[in-house]
């Protein structure tokens, strides 16, 4: 309210000041007009000079008076721009022809949008940082500065390094045999045979696990043309379920900066299926539920649960 | 081909074989099992006519299983086994001067086939010379290949529709509980059927028609 | 809704009463190439198959009469393939007008436990040999050109010695009993192979 009042007062002072400027300009014009016209025709030279000087003095006094008036008014006007919340852009609101150029309202709208966007982006970024759903390195807001470094180091790893990591993991688990294939170029496909229980095909992109499919120990892992069959699902409901859970595990174990740890954690988790048919559910104590053994393995404790028995 | 257990289910007292079989069907259906066609297993017995050695010759069993319809499964009691194609039956005809078909010893089990998750259940009526003598139940858990691994799981499943009278680990596995179930053929299953058939045959011993 | 029933096979399945029609001959090693060349021209236009088989001949002696003979063959080139068990009956006597030897034949594919199993049945291995050669086909006709070698050490198929300086040539057809027209086809085919090889009706009993 005070602002509006202030603006109103200022507007009056403005119009007075503009009038004062006009008056000043006309008085200044008069000074130069009289100077240009020179002395008027009078009988005597002295008379002529006297009249000219008097006129000139009068004119200058008028200029002086108008200038003083303008100075007085300009003090009243003050500096309105400083008090406006939108600084100089606020002056747009003073444009009287708003209907033709609705710049100010558009500006406000844009400002609101950008505010909202910033707020939501902030929320999203904090949420994403809590969840570790980072499938690739190029979306982490926090480590934006590191991005150029992270991306090449994890997505383009030397083949030798991948081989080393895999063979080291293979040596860690004697009951698990890992065969490495490179059917198309540099991407590795692992065939993991766990005891006499299951076979898992793990499709890698560098050291990231892209996809996994689990089949029974006695099921075919090769298609008719002798290549690894990475698509068709198991004939058995148990292993279809385990495949689903393994895919969940892929999303759970994610640590873009240390992909080898991810592969190792996943393999450790997968290894807990070695007693798939021998372990009763840790919650209901039974082997079967809907004809299926406990197919879920806790990500931390590796305990066995039925799909419906886990929390 | 997974781990299979074949067992005999006693006929409920006061009921016929047929009624007991129907009761089993009903229980399986209540559990959620789905009927998938039928099955049969049969067994012909032969004995060698040329008994050269001092000890009595062993019996030769030629069996068929609807799961492997083009094969003959040939077994000796506790001896070597052979999986052959259906022409083996013709060969046995050619061999009839050396191996005689023990008439009246033909046993077969026929019935319905049910599927429940990864389980395959076959409830069969065992018949000898066209009279029903008993009930066989075959349970196969097809997802696992190590009998020792999934035995407890299978036992729990069988208890769910057979009640507490569940058999022990079949003797064909006890010698190789940690080993693999015969993967390519169904010899372990046929051995169990053979055991069950001779058990049923002995139960019904009539004078004059005993097992040689 | 009921699933389609499992195929029910008759208990005595298999193909009953198949006959083998056979003509035999031999060529010296030197003329092998020209015979193969001729056969390639005469037979079905498919790549001729080579084979290397190990055959064990088993006898079951009864109280009287001839011993029962079974031939068990396994492929040396494909060790995982099933064994092939073959029963060959006595040649049919008489009927001079027929151009080929005719005998009963039963072929059975069997698992690898076959030798043990035959032993348990009372069969004893009589002799063994290795046959290496080529198979040609023309319709139902089968031509087998093979070199027979005997194993120097029983059971060892790597250490063999050729039985002769020639190749055995056999022309055979499997057909149900009573289809004697096939022997006509065989005769005309054999005519076309002359004078490279003379295929004749040879009675094995005459050689014994």
Image (spheres, coloured by chain):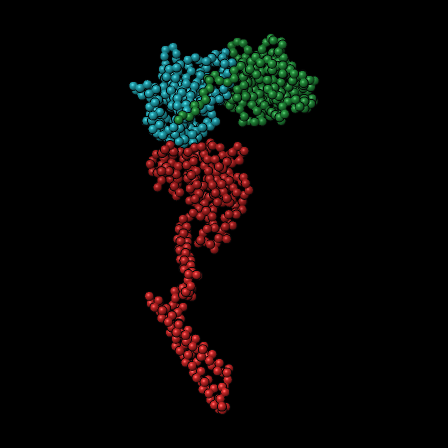
Chain colours: A red, B cyan, C green
- In this orientation, does residue C192 appear? yes
B153 vs B139, nearest the viewer: B139
B116 vs A219, nearest the viewer: B116
Residue at 36% x, 33% y: name it.
A290
In percent of width and height, residue C163 lies at 64, 19
In percent of width and height, residue A143 lies at 45, 54
User: From the image, which quarter does the N terminus of chain C lie in?
Assistant: top left
- In this orientation, does residue B76 appear? no
User: From the image, which quarter does the C terminus of chain C lie in?
Assistant: top right
Left or right of C178 on screen, residue A87: left
Q: Quadrant of residue A268?
A: top left
Pick out the residue farthest to the left: B14
Q: Is residue A88 above or below residue C176?
A: below
Left or right of A136 on screen, residue C157: right
A83 vs C100, nearest the viewer: A83
Q: Is residue C78 above or below residue A141?
A: above
Q: Is residue A230 above or below residue B7?
A: below
In percent of width and height, residue A10 lies at 37, 71
Q: Count the numbered circles shown.
A: 0
Q: Quadrant of residue B157?
A: top left
Residue at 58% x, 22% y: name it.
C54
Residue at 38% x, 68% y: name it.
A83
Left or right of A133 on screen, residue A153: right
Residue at 54% x, 34% y: name it.
A226
In percent of width and height, residue A281 lies at 36, 36
């Amino acid at each position: 309210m005070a602002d509006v009042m202030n603006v109103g007062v200022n507007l009056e002072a403005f119009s007075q000041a503009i009038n004062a400027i006009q008056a000043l300009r006309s008085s200044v014009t008069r000074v130069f007009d009289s100077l240009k016209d020179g002395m008027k025709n009078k009988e005597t030279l002295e008379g002529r000079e006297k009249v000219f000087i008097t006129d000139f003095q009068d004119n200058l006094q008028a200029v002086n008076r108008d200038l003083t008036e303008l100075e007085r008014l300009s003090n009243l006007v003050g500096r309105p721009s400083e008090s406006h919340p939108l600084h100089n852009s606020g002056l747009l609101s003073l444009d009287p022809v708003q209907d033709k150029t609705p710049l100010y309202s558009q500006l406000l709208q844009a400002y609101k949008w950008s505010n909202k966007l910033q707020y939501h982006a902030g929320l999203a970024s904090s949420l994403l940082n809590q969840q570790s759903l980072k499938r690739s390195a190029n979306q982490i807001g926090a480590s934006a500065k590191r991005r150029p470094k992270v991306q090449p180091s994890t997505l383009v790893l030397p083949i030798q390094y991948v081989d080393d990591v895999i063979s080291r993991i293979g040596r860690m688990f004697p009951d698990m045999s890992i065969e490495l294939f490179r059917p198309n170029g540099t991407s590795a496909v692992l065939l993991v045979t766990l005891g006499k229980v299951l076979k898992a095909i793990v499709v890698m992109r560098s050291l990231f696990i892209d996809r996994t499919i689990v089949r029974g120990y006695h099921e075919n892992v090769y298609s008719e043309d002798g290549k690894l069959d990475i698509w068709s699902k198991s004939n058995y409901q148990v292993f279809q379920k385990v495949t689903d859970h393994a895919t969940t595990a892929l999303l759970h174990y994610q640590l873009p900066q240390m992909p080898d740890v991810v592969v190792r954690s996943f393999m450790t988790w997968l290894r807990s299926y070695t007693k798939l048919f021998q372990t009763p559910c840790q919650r209901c104590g039974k082997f079967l539920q809907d004809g299926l053994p406990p197919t879920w393995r806790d990500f931390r404790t590796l305990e066995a649960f039925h799909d419906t028995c886990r929390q | 081909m997974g781990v299979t257990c074949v067992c005999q289910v006693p006929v409920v007292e006061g009921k016929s074989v047929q009624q007991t079989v129907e009761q089993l069907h009903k229980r399986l259906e209540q559990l959620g099992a789905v009927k998938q066609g039928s099955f049969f297993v049969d067994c012909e017995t032969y004995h060698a006519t040329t008994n050269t050695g001092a000890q009595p010759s062993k019996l030769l069993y030629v069996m068929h299983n609807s799961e492997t319809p083009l094969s003959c499964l040939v077994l000796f009691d506790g001896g070597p086994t052979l999986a052959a194609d259906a022409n083996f039956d013709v060969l046995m005809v050619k061999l009839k001067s050396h191996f005689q078909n023990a008439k009246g010893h033909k046993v077969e089990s026929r019935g319905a086939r049910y599927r429940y998750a990864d389980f395959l259940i076959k409830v069969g009526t065992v018949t000898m010379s066209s009279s029903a003598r008993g009930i066989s139940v075959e349970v196969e858990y097809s997802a696992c290949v190590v009998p020792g691994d999934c035995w407890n799981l299978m036992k729990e499943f069988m208890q769910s529709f057979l009640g507490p009278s569940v058999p022990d680990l079949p003797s064909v596995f006890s010698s190789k509980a940690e080993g693999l179930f015969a993967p390519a053929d169904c010899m372990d299953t046929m051995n169990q059927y053979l055991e069950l058939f001779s058990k049923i045959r002995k139960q019904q011993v009539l004078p004059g028609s005993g097992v040689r | 809704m009921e699933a389609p029933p499992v195929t029910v096979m008759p208990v005595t399945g298999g193909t009953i009463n198949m006959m083998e029609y056979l003509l035999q001959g031999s060529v010296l090693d030197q003329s092998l190439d020209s015979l193969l060349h001729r056969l390639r021209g005469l037979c079905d236009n498919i790549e001729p198959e080579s084979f290397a088989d190990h055959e064990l001949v088993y006898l079951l002696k009864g109280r009287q009469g001839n011993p029962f003979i079974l031939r068990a063959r396994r492929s040396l080139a494909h060790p995982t393939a099933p064994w092939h068990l073959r029963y060959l009956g006595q040649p049919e006597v008489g009927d001079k007008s027929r151009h080929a030897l005719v005998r009963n034949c039963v072929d059975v594919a069997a698992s690898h436990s076959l030798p043990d199993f035959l032993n348990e049945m009372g069969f004893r291995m009589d002799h063994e040999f290795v046959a290496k050669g080529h198979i040609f086909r023309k319709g139902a006709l089968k031509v087998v050109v093979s070199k027979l070698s005997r194993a120097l050490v029983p059971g060892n198929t790597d250490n063999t010695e050729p039985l002769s300086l020639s190749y055995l040539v056999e022309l055979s057809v499997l057909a149900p009993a009573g289809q004697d027209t096939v022997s006509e086809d065989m005769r005309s085919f054999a005519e076309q192979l002359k004078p490279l090889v003379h295929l004749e009706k040879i009675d094995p009993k005459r050689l014994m």
